[in-house]
């Protein structure tokens, strides 16, 4: 795939130049970017149960959004937001803390307080993770890699894509959910492939990868 590697490399270079030009003509401080993002989040969630309870639109209409947000919205730990809000999302209710229905929950690593926590993974969050992954690939331009690196395979090591069905939703490792939702155009590069990615036993998965990896011609290794 020499032509494909060169094409991807040129696309990355073009995106890099466009990004530099945009930042040159429209410089924005990090603080301003964060404030803009806060406004977007408030507008997006304004008509959810959480947004209506805390009157997000009143916050948006205030003269100092940041200060009013700090005053009105309490800091939640996992247990408090689970018992007050997220339990309704787990039960299949729509529009609780974010628009729509949450179909996926990521399981956190076990802690002394709880065996595992269920973190809502909305459609928008999955889309955001995909965008971040693409941006990471685009950032490769700064390292001046050869175009040949984009002609080979990408090995992603992560949790099982064989998710557990729990009533109204699926749950599993964040890495497994992310791998299950990778875009179709990425499949040609993706290893270890769907069958091995489903394996729940970590040792078995690693052994199978070690057995087959010499035939894959891997150029990038990703730990998820």
Image (cartoon, grey):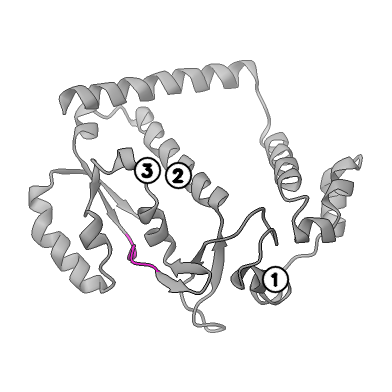
- Residue under the point 49% across and 70% down: 108
Marks 3 and 1, Cα distance to the nearest angstrom? Answer: 32 Å
Q: Is label 3 in contact with label 1 (beta carbons under 8 Å)?
A: no
Counting from the top left corner in percent of width and height, residue 60 is at 84, 43
Q: Is residue 223 left or right of residue 91?
A: left
- The residue that mark 3 highlights is 183
- Tag 3 secondary structure: loop
- Mark 1 residue element: helix
Q: How many marks?
A: 3
Around disc 1, counting alpha carbons within 10 Å, would you say few (fewer than 14), some (14 to 19), or many (20 or more)?
few
* C-beta proximity under 8 Å, tags 2 and 3: yes
Vertical comparison of 116 with 27: above or below = below
Q: Earlier in the sequence, mark 1 or mark 2?
A: 1
* 220, above or below 17, in the image: below
Which of pointers 3 and 1 lies earlier in the amino acid sequence?
Answer: 1
The residue at which mark 2 appears reads as 130
Q: CA distance from mark 2 to mark 3?
A: 8 Å
Task: Check residue 213 in the rendering and tell me which mark sits there, or answer none.
Answer: none
Query: Image quadrant of residue 13?
Result: top left
Horizontal side of 96 relative to 68 (left or right) equals left
x and y percentages locating residue 85 in the rendered image: 71, 69
Which part of the image, by quadrant, shows the N terminus? top left
Q: Position of residue 136 (x, y in %)?
A: 41, 39
When asked about the image quadrant of residue 157, the answer is bottom left
**Mark 1 sits on what residue?**
81
First in sequence, mark 2 or 3: give its number.
Answer: 2
Give the magenta part as a residue range: 158-163
Majority SS type along the magenta span: loop
């Amino acid at each position: 795939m020499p032509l494909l590697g060169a094409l991807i490399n040129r696309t990355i270079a073009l995106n890099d130049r466009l990004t530099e030009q945009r930042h040159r003509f429209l410089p924005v401080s990090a603080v301003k970017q964060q404030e803009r993002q806060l406004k977007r989040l408030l507008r997006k969630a304004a008509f959810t149960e959480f947004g209506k309870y805390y009157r997000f639109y009143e916050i948006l209409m205030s003269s100092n959004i940041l200060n009013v947000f700090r005053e009105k919205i309490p800091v939640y730990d996992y247990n408090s937001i689970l018992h007050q809000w997220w339990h309704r999302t787990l039960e299949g209710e729509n529009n609780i803390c974010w628009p729509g229905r949450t179909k996926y929950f990521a399981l956190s690593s076990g802690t002394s307080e709880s065996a595992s926590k269920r973190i809502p993974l909305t459609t928008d969050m999955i889309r955001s993770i995909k965008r971040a992954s693409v941006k990471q690939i685009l950032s490769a331009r700064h390292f001046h890699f050869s175009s040949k690196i984009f002609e080979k395979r990408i090995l992603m090591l992560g949790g099982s894509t064989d998710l557990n069905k729990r009533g109204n939703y699926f749950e599993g490792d964040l890495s497994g959910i992310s791998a299950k939702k990778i875009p179709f155009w990425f499949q040609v590069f993706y290893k270890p492939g769907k069958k091995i990615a489903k394996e729940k036993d970590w040792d078995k998965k690693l052994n199978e990868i070690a057995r087959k990896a010499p035939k894959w011609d891997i150029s990038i290794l990703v730990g998820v």
